[in-house]
Image (tube, helix red, strand yellow):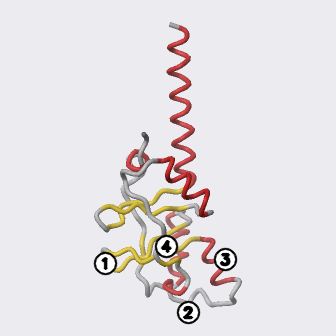
Amino acid sequence: MKTVQQILNTKPVQIYSVTPTTSVLDALKMMTEKNISALVIMDKESLLGIFTERDYARKIILQGKSSKDTPISEAMTQSPITVSPTDSIDLCMQIMTEKHIRHLPVVKDNTACGMVSIGDVVKFIIADQKQTISQLESYISS
């Protein structure tokens, strides 16, 4: 069984976060600087929520709110669905498909330790399938 930790091992050990009082505009600036599409909202060690480009579109732009004057706490998705490093990649795919979400914070010992995106999951699955195919071809030709 392939695990979330195996995906995390292929990524930089960086989780980008902001506090609940950060403005939506500052969060968007960070997302642009880091070339990411989701941030976690933290209060010290506690995961409070997640903020994605989808949250921005639905909770700020379409509501006519000001990015500069709105704290991220008003736009974030509270109590996000999370996974642990020991969870399977299949579970991630199932959650993302059923819940129509693209990002899953990874939590270990009640602390956010990473983020897994749908792109990470698909990339990992494709690489794993290529390796399996290569091994099967090698087995068949020997």
Alpha carbon separation for disc pair 1 and 4: 15 Å
Q: Say whether disc 2 or disc 1 marks the residue closer to the N-terminus.
A: 1
Q: Say whether disc 1 or disc 3 marks the residue closer to the N-terminus.
A: 1
Residue extending furthest left?
109
Which quadrant is home to the N terminus?
top left
Instruction: Indicate the amino acid at tag 2.
Output: Asp
Alpha carbon separation for disc pair 2 and 4: 19 Å
Alpha carbon separation for disc pair 1 and 3: 27 Å
| Residue at disc 4, secondary structure | strand
Residue 110 location (% of width, % of height): 31, 68
Disc 2 crowd rating (10 Å Cα; few below 14, some 14-19, many 20+) is: few
Disc 3 crowd rating (10 Å Cα; few below 14, some 14-19, many 20+) is: few
Alpha carbon separation for disc pair 4 and 3: 14 Å
Q: Say whether disc 1 or disc 4 marks the residue closer to the N-terminus.
A: 1
Residue annotated with mark 2? 69
Residue shown at the point (42%, 67%) measured from the top left: 16
Instruction: Indicate the amino acid at tag 3.
Output: Ala
Residue annotated with mark 4? 50
Residue annotated with mark 3? 57
Residue shown at the point (56%, 65%) measured from the top left: 37
Work out whether 87 lies above or below 47.
above
Alpha carbon separation for disc pair 3 and 2: 16 Å
Q: Nearer the viewer, mark 2 or mark 1?
A: 1
Residue 130 location (% of width, % of height): 55, 30
Residue annotated with mark 1? 44
Q: Which mark is residue 31?
A: none
